[in-house]
Image (spheres, grey):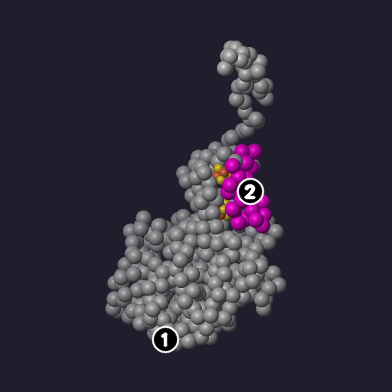
C-alpha cells in the first residue's frame, strides 16, 4: 500500500537568536517511492556469481559506456530495473546481449559484475535448454570437434602447409622448444585467420624463434563458451588442453587469441595449467630491434583494442608499439580507445549469436565500430583478435565501406612491411 508523507514536527530551535519553529524546520520520514515484488530479482541474485546484480543503485554510469546500449536498449542498469519490475532475466533477450566487454565494471561504483553475472545466469538457462539455437550449435561443434566452427581436428594444422616456412608440430618435433604457440580455432581454420597465422609463422622464422604448435592435439581454449554459459564444456576443454601441453617441454606459451590469453592467465591455473603466457604482440615487442622493414605502409591506420587484451588483461601498449615501428604508418586513435574501447560484439558468445543479436539491435556492434573508424579517416583498421577480422570485414561490406577501409591483423601488417607476405594494404 502506498505510504503517505508524514511530517515530523521538531521542537522550536533558536539559531543566532532567531526562533525557528517546527513548521519551518520540519523533515519527512524517508519513504519508499514504490514497492516492488523482488522475487524475480532474488531468483537471479540467489545464483552463486550473480549476487552483485542486487547491488545496483541505478546511477546509470554503465548505460553511458555499454557498447550494446549505443546500438540498442540494454545495460546493467536496465537489466536491474526490468528484473525489479518483474521481467525474468531467464526469459528476456537481455540475457544474451551482453558481450562481457567489461566496460560497465570499469565504471560501476557498486561493482555490479556482469563478467560473473552473465556466465552464472546463462549456465542455468543453457541447462534449462533456453538458449539461442545458433549458440547451442557452436557448443555442440566445440564438444564434438574441439572447435566452434565444426572443422575436423585433423585439419587443425593444415594452414601451416601454406606458410612456406617450418612450423614444427610438437608430436613430430620430439624435442623441447622455447615458445609453444597456442594457435586457437579461428587462426587455424578461418581463411582470414589463416592469413594472419601464416604471417606470424613467417615473422617467427625471420626472427629465429624456436617454436612449435600442438596441431591436432590442440582444442578450443573455451573461454567464450564459458562466458556464454557452458562451464562444463570449458572445464572439459581446459583439462584436454592442459593434458596435451603438459606432454611437452617449453619455456613460454604464446597465444594469438586474447580470449585464450584470458583463459590461460586466469582460468587454466585453477585446473593446474600454469605457464608464463603472452599474447603474440607482447612476444614481438622485445624483438623490434631485430626486425628489418623493407616496405613502408603509407596509410592512416587506427587500432581496435580487443576487450580481452585491453580491459580484461591491461595490455594497451604492445599492439601500438608494433604499429608505430612500421615505416610510413600513421596511427590515429578513435575516441573510444584503450580503457574505453568499443567492442566488436564477438565476446561472451556474441561471435555465435549474430542472427539473434542483429535482429534485436539497430546495427551490429562491428558495424558501429567500422563506421567510427571511417569517421576518423582511417584507411586500415588494425586488429589483433581473431574474431575481429571476419566481423569487421563483413561490417565493412554491410555498411557500404568496401574500398574505403581495410581490416588487417597486426601480424599481417608487420609481415608485409618486413617483405614476408603481400597483404592487401
Ligand atoms: S553503474 Fe553499477 S550501480 Fe550504476 S546503474 Fe550501472 S550497474 Fe547500477
Ligand atoms: S560487459 Fe559490456 S556489453 Fe556487457 S553489460 Fe557491461 S558494458 Fe554492456
Which of 312/290 is in front? 290
Q: Is mark 1 within 8 Å of ligand 2?
A: no
Magenta-drawn segment: 59-86
State how many labels appear.
2
SS at circle 1: loop
Q: How far apart are marks 1 and 2 (CA)?
A: 50 Å
Q: In this view, does 244 lie above or below 359?
A: below
Q: Does the residue labelled 2 lie within 8 Å of ligand 2?
A: no
Q: How crowded is mark 1: few (under 14 residues within 10 Å), some or many (20 or more)?
A: some
Percent across and percent down for residue 55 are 52, 40
| Quarter-of-image position of residue 273 | bottom left
Q: Does the magenta segment cover residue 261?
A: no
Q: Does the magenta segment cover residue 77?
A: yes
Which of 209/137 is in front? 209
Q: Quadrant of the N terminus?
A: top right
Percent across and percent down for residue 252 are 34, 70
Q: In this view, does 32 lie above or below 15?
A: below
The disc, 1 or 2, on the residue closer to the chain's N-terminal end is 2
Which of 381/182 is in front? 381
Tell me the tag on residue 165. 1
Q: Which residue is drawn at 33% across and 64% down?
A: 275
Q: Ligand 1 lies in which image quarter?
A: top right
Can residue 195 be seen by looking at this rendering?
Answer: no
Q: Is residue 259 above or below residue 124?
A: below
SS at circle 2: loop
Q: Name the residue tied to disc 2.
A: 92
Percent across and percent down for residue 399 are 69, 69
* Left or right placement of residue 147 versus residue 10 in this view: left
* Farthest front residue in view: 17
| Quarter-of-image position of residue 98 | bottom right
* Disc 1 to disc 2: CB gap under 8 Å: no
* Left or right placement of residue 93 versus residue 48 in this view: right
Amino acid at each position: 500500500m502506498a505510504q503517505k508523507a508524514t511530517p515530523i514536527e521538531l521542537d522550536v530551535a533558536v539559531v543566532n537568536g532567531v526562533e525557528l519553529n517546527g513548521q519551518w524546520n520540519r523533515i519527512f520520514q524517508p519513504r519508499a517511492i514504490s514497492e516492488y515484488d523482488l522475487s524475480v530479482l532474488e531468483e537471479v541474485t540467489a545464483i552463486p556469481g550473480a549476487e552483485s546484480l542486487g547491488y545496483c543503485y541505478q546511477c546509470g554510469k554503465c548505460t553511458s559506456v555499454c557498447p550494446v546500449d549505443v546500438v540498442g536498449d540494454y545495460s546493467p542498469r536496465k537489466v536491474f530495473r526490468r528484473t525489479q519490475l518483474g521481467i525474468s532475466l531467464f526469459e528476456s533477450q537481455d540475457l544474451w546481449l551482453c558481450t562481457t566487454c567489461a566496460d560497465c565494471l570499469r565504471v560501476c561504483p557498486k561493482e555490479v559484475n556482469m563478467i560473473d553475472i552473465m556466465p552464472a545466469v546463462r549456465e542455468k538457462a543453457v541447462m534449462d535448454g533456453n538458449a539461442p539455437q545458433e549458440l547451442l550449435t557452436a557448443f555442440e561443434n566445440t564438444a564434438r570437434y574441439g572447435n566452434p566452427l565444426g572443422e575436423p581436428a585433423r585439419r587443425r594444422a593444415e594452414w601451416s602447409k601454406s606458410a612456406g616456412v617450418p612450423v614444427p608440430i610438437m608430436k613430430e618435433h620430439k624435442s623441447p622448444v622455447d615458445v609453444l604457440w597456442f594457435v586457437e580455432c579461428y587462426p587455424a581454420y578461418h581463411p582470414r585467420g589463416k592469413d594472419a597465422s601464416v604471417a606470424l609463422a613467417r615473422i617467427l622464422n625471420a626472427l629465429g624463434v624456436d617454436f612449435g604448435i600442438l596441431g591436432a592435439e590442440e582444442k578450443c581454449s573455451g573461454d567464450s563458451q564459458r562466458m556464454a554459459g557452458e562451464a562444463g564444456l570449458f572445464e572439459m576443454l581446459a583439462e584436454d588442453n592442459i593434458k596435451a601441453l603438459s606432454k611437452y617441454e617449453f619455456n613460454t606459451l604464446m597465444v594469438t587469441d586474447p580470449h585464450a590469453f584470458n583463459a590461460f592467465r586466469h582460468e587454466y591455473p585453477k585446473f593446474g595449467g600454469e605457464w608464463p603466457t603472452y599474447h603474440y604482440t607482447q612476444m614481438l615487442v622485445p624483438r623490434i630491434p631485430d626486425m628489418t622493414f623493407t616496405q613502408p605502409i603509407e596509410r592512416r591506420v587506427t587500432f581496435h583494442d580487443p576487450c580481452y587484451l585491453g580491459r580484461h588483461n591491461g595490455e594497451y601498449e604492445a599492439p601500438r608499439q608494433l604499429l608505430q615501428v612500421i615505416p610510413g604508418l600513421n596511427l590515429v586513435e578513435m575516441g573510444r580507445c584503450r580503457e574505453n574501447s568499443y567492442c566488436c560484439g564477438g565476446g561472451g558468445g556474441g561471435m555465435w549469436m549474430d542472427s539473434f543479436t542483429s535482429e534485436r539491435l539497430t546495427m551490429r556492434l562491428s558495424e558501429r565500430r567500422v563506421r567510427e573508424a571511417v569517421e576518423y579517416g582511417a584507411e586500415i583498421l588494425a586488429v589483433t583478435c581473431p574474431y575481429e577480422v571476419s566481423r569487421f570485414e563483413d561490417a565493412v561490406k554491410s555498411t557500404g565501406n568496401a574500398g574505403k577501409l581495410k581490416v588487417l591483423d597486426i601480424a599481417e601488417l608487420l609481415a608485409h612491411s618486413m617483405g614476408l607476405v603481400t597483404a592487401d594494404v
